[in-house]
Image: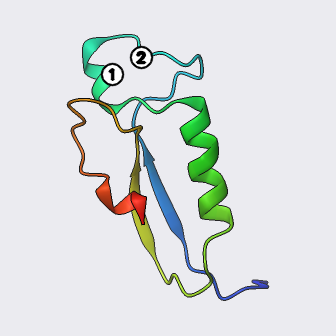
Amino acid sequence: MDVTDAGPINIRIGNFPGDNRPHSERSAHIWISVRDMVALAECCVEANDSIRFLSLYGTSANTGNYYDIGYLER
Protein backbone atom coordinates (compact mmCIF):
# COMPACT_ATOMS: atom_id res chain seq x y z
CA MET A 1 0.00 0.00 0.00
CA ASP A 2 1.26 3.48 -0.95
CA VAL A 3 1.49 5.90 1.95
CA THR A 4 2.13 8.93 -0.30
CA ASP A 5 0.73 10.25 -3.53
CA ALA A 6 4.19 10.31 -5.12
CA GLY A 7 4.53 8.91 -8.60
CA PRO A 8 7.43 6.93 -10.04
CA ILE A 9 10.80 8.55 -10.72
CA ASN A 10 12.98 6.70 -13.21
CA ILE A 11 16.71 7.38 -13.38
CA ARG A 12 18.68 6.30 -16.42
CA ILE A 13 22.13 6.02 -14.87
CA GLY A 14 24.90 6.85 -17.31
CA ASN A 15 28.19 5.32 -16.17
CA PHE A 16 28.59 4.64 -12.45
CA PRO A 17 31.64 2.47 -11.78
CA GLY A 18 31.63 3.55 -8.12
CA ASP A 19 35.28 4.53 -7.93
CA ASN A 20 35.03 8.23 -8.82
CA ARG A 21 36.62 8.14 -12.24
CA PRO A 22 35.47 7.24 -15.73
CA HIS A 23 37.32 4.34 -17.37
CA SER A 24 37.21 5.41 -21.01
CA GLU A 25 36.64 8.47 -23.18
CA ARG A 26 33.11 7.34 -24.01
CA SER A 27 32.21 6.66 -20.40
CA ALA A 28 33.54 10.11 -19.42
CA HIS A 29 30.66 11.70 -21.35
CA ILE A 30 27.98 9.84 -19.36
CA TRP A 31 29.85 9.34 -16.07
CA ILE A 32 28.27 10.23 -12.70
CA SER A 33 30.36 10.66 -9.57
CA VAL A 34 29.54 8.96 -6.29
CA ARG A 35 28.71 12.36 -4.76
CA ASP A 36 26.35 13.27 -7.62
CA MET A 37 24.70 9.82 -7.61
CA VAL A 38 24.00 10.06 -3.87
CA ALA A 39 22.66 13.62 -4.26
CA LEU A 40 20.44 12.56 -7.16
CA ALA A 41 19.04 9.60 -5.23
CA GLU A 42 18.37 11.80 -2.20
CA CYS A 43 16.55 14.35 -4.35
CA CYS A 44 14.38 11.61 -5.84
CA VAL A 45 13.50 10.15 -2.44
CA GLU A 46 12.70 13.60 -1.04
CA ALA A 47 10.85 14.81 -4.16
CA ASN A 48 7.62 16.71 -3.85
CA ASP A 49 4.57 14.45 -3.82
CA SER A 50 3.10 16.50 -6.67
CA ILE A 51 5.43 14.75 -9.14
CA ARG A 52 3.22 12.27 -10.98
CA PHE A 53 5.98 10.79 -13.16
CA LEU A 54 9.57 11.74 -13.96
CA SER A 55 12.28 10.18 -16.13
CA LEU A 56 15.75 11.68 -16.04
CA TYR A 57 19.37 11.00 -16.92
CA GLY A 58 21.84 10.43 -14.09
CA THR A 59 25.14 11.96 -15.22
CA SER A 60 27.45 14.58 -13.76
CA ALA A 61 27.87 17.92 -15.56
CA ASN A 62 30.67 16.53 -17.73
CA THR A 63 32.30 18.28 -20.65
CA GLY A 64 30.80 16.83 -23.82
CA ASN A 65 27.89 15.23 -21.97
CA TYR A 66 25.69 13.33 -24.44
CA TYR A 67 22.52 14.32 -22.58
CA ASP A 68 20.94 17.68 -21.80
CA ILE A 69 20.68 17.68 -18.00
CA GLY A 70 19.99 21.39 -17.54
CA TYR A 71 16.55 20.56 -16.17
CA LEU A 72 18.20 18.95 -13.13
CA GLU A 73 19.36 22.35 -11.88
CA ARG A 74 15.78 23.31 -10.98
Residue 59: horizontal and vertical position, in percent? 40, 40
Residue 13 position (above or below residue 11): above
Mark carried by residue 27: 1
Task: Give the percent coordinates (x, y) of residue 66.
Answer: 21, 38
Quarter of the image that includes the N terminus:
bottom right
The amino acid at mark 2 is: Pro
Image-quadrant location for residue 67: top left
Mark 1–mark 2 distance (CA, rounded to whole Å): 6 Å
Q: To which quarter of the image does residue 27 belong? A: top left
Where 2 falls versus 60 (above or below)? below
The three-letter amino acid code for the residue at tag 1 is Ser
Of residues 17 and 69, which is closer to you in this image?
69
Q: Are marks 1 and 2 in contact (CB under 8 Å)?
A: yes
For the residue labelled by badge 1, is the local secondary structure a helix, a strand or a loop? Answer: helix
Task: Find disc 2 in the rendering and name its residue.
Answer: 22
Q: Give the residue at the far front of this rendering.
A: 73
5 shown above or below 24: below
**In the foreground, 28 or 7:** 28
Q: Where is residue 31 in the image (x, y as percent from the top left)?
A: 40, 29
Secondary structure category for the residue under label 2: loop
Question: At which x and y percent is residue 34?
Answer: 60, 31
At a point 57% along the width and 41% down the height, the residue shown is 37
Crowd tier of the residue under label 2, counting other residues whose Cα lies within 10 Å: few below 14, some 14–19, many 20 or above:
some
Residue at 46% x, 77% y is 53
Sequence-first tag of 1 and 2: 2
**Residue drawn at x 33%, y 62% as measured from the top left:** 71
